[in-house]
Image (spheres, grey):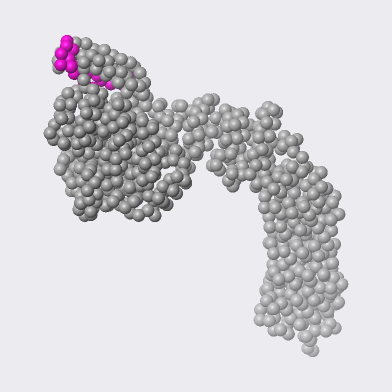
Amino acid sequence: MRMFRPTGPERLVAIAVEPVAGSADRISLRVQRFFKRGALTGTEAYGPFALDELEDRLADLSDDLASAGFTRAGVRAMLDRINSPSARRRALSALRLGWIGDRTAVDPLIDRATLEGTELSCVVEALGRLGDSTAVPLARVEAARKLLSRRRAGAEALRALGDAEGMAEVSQRAVDRLPQAMRDGWKAVDASAVDEDALTDLEAVFAHLDVKEQFLALDTLYEIGAPLAVAFVRRVLATHADLHRPHRWRYTKSILRRATLRDDGETFAVVTRRVELLSRKPSATMAVVKSGLDGQSRQTRVFSTPTQRHVRKAAWRYLERLARYRPARYTEVAAAVLAAYRPEDRELPKGNGDEWSRVYLYNRILRRFDGRLFFNPKTLRTSVVNPKAKAALLPTARTESFPLVWDAYPRPLLTLLAEAKVVEVQQFALRAVTARHPELPRLATARQLVGMLTAVFPDTVTLALSELDRRFNPLAPDWALLEVMMADERAVIREHAVALLTRCADAWTTDIERLVGFVGSPDALLRSTAASLVLAALPTADPWFRRELAERVLAILQAPETSEGINDGFARVARDGLAEELNAILGLDEILAMIDRGSTAAKVAGGALLGSRPEAVDLLGTDRILAMAMSDIAAVRQSAHALLGSALARLRSDPSVLFALTDCEWKDTRAFAFELLRGPVDVAALGLDGIVGLCDSNRTDVQEFGREMALKHFDALDSAALLQRLAEHPSPVIRRFAVDLAVAHLKEGFVALSGLEAFFRRALLDVMPDRREKVLVVDFLRERGLRDERQAEVASRVLGEFVRTRGKGDFERALDALVRLKLQYPQVDSVVGVSA
């Protein structure tokens, strides 16, 4: 910044901002005094001080120099031109005075405004940039105008001047100007906070507005300037396909103008990116539209090629003025522009162009001094000077615009590392950080560090991990960083958070508030890991801590769940780590209330506690425990198992409860019943009907258990009745088992065999016979018949009926058996005879 005065021993003062070595957030001011150019008379240094103090320090220094007769460079020339006969020159001079920021221009500008020339809007905008409160009355009058350009200049000037009362009036008029549907929707939301549901509601209202009202509503909301309004405007502008069409483009330009007056880098970036992309193909439209300058309606070409180029060049002029007059803001806005680009914004190279040749601002900001490229100021395109050459840039080459400004204000490089989606932008930021600002990552916010962890450039991720390891102390964790990581929507970030949480478990497993926050996290992985870490720490915890934690966990479990599964971690801690403390606090009635009326997590904890109360068996009764054993909550079923296991005497006298459990839909309950029936409770007490009932089940594991019990108790049961019942079973598996059982375990003698004559006949004459069964029965009858005459009679009758059916597969086998029996016992009646 330079300041001049016409007389005196020192007539020129140059003020420069210099970074402090080794500290990215501290700077100093160097002031050089000259009699004339090249004639240095003295140098002074101020600082170092924090970067945030820069504007105040510069203002103080400027005021001191102004009191000594100095004015900013260019002020005198611009003040002379403010009264030029040319309206264009007056307007440009007023805007330049606003950028220069010398408040000696306030009174001349106010005097010029009283003449109400066509440059009035520019004068008011300049007064807003100068920030002098004497301009408030004028700005209030202009903010109430009907004409868009004047109303916009007044409203944005009031915002810049910090006039709360005037802005309240502006906001109210803006709300009244909204279309009725949008006005109603706006009043129904909280404008002070950016809420996803509120944004969705506003989008739904916006979609149903008339085409001519949609972007009028957008510009009006942006005029209001509430956080929700700004977020909504950015979202629509980033995604709406037709912002360059009639009745939309006018208000899009207005929003862009407002963004430059506010130095709103994000909104500026959204609009300029869309303009760059839409400029790639012809999209002009003829329409009758109203001018924002004079309010007249006329036939106009909307979004013509000259308009596109004018807007793109105006955007770069704005950035150049930021770099010259407000350098700290330049790097912020330029970083926002670069971060807005996406990989899909690339084009396939054509001719001597490359992927980014037609992205004007990208090239101006990032590649302005790349000697391999040529810029065409007429088409705003960048081309490769020698497409065949593969020359690479030197590592120390600086191609970006205003490199010294980037060096003086490097903080926005962190924004690029955290948010940029284009690899080339990431590479630019990373080179600058590693080569010139290695200490910068220490200043990264938690949110920026989280963004760097998912960057598109691997080296950025490495840098983020290195910084994360450096700043993370397990004994004194960065809780703010952990909270941001845990709240991130990306799974990979939450996984990093879980890993860090595990490393610092000792720091939070003794802090009830943090413990409750982590175990109750919405993220399933986080709450599961947190619960496991708490359970690992509880055995060595102090008794008072366990008691206090038990009371806190109990209060959470007894309250309704805010979302399904949110209290699962607390249920685990209660069940596996705090059962003793909770049993001391809760009575049996309270535990039952948790099971009957509590959430799923409460049922889990209550079931685990109930299982350790043997006295509950008498109170609950068999039917209640049976119902619990069939509950869809595993912990409740396990508590029922524990209670039944403590009441073996009752089960031995009446095992019907276990029989009912064998047909439960839950496998763990069936397995529990099987275990008891194999061991302490004798299944024989169920009798023949019970064992057959097990075999009759539709569940394969129950059928298998029934076969096991039938085999085990075959000798103790009525074998004939058992086999007859099994033979009638519809399942071929059970019928086959019956045959195997009879063949392998039938007692010796005629009585046993004759009792099963009907069984063997059924097996051979089955409508859908099994060949294996028939072979077994035929061979078994032959073997038993050969032992004595009476058994031969039984075998001959059964086999004789079978051979009369002339079955194809086993006829000869059965006939062979009959012949053998006849030869052994000729006197036995048979369908075969012995010839002489």
813 vs 520: above or below: below
What's the magenta region? Answer: 1-21
72 vs 550: above or below: above
* Nearer to me, 634 or 89: 89
* Nearer to me, 482 or 752: 482
Who's the residue at 24% across and 12% down the image? Answer: 43
114 vs 13: above or below: below
Who's the residue at 75% across and 72% down the image? Answer: 728
- Indicate the position of residue 432 as horizontal and vertical percent values: 31, 29
- Indicate the position of residue 816 as horizontal and vertical percent values: 73, 79
* Nearer to me, 138 or 604: 138
Who's the residue at 74% across and 58% down the image? Answer: 662
Queried whether the magenta region covers residue 5, the answer comes back as: yes
- Indicate the position of residue 374 as horizontal and vertical percent values: 16, 39
Is residue 498 found left or right of 99 in the rendered image?
A: right
Is residue 694 found left or right of 92 in the rendered image?
A: right
| Residue 653 visible (yes or no) | yes
- Indicate the position of residue 518 as horizontal and vertical percent values: 57, 36
Who's the residue at 71% across and 74% down the image? Answer: 774
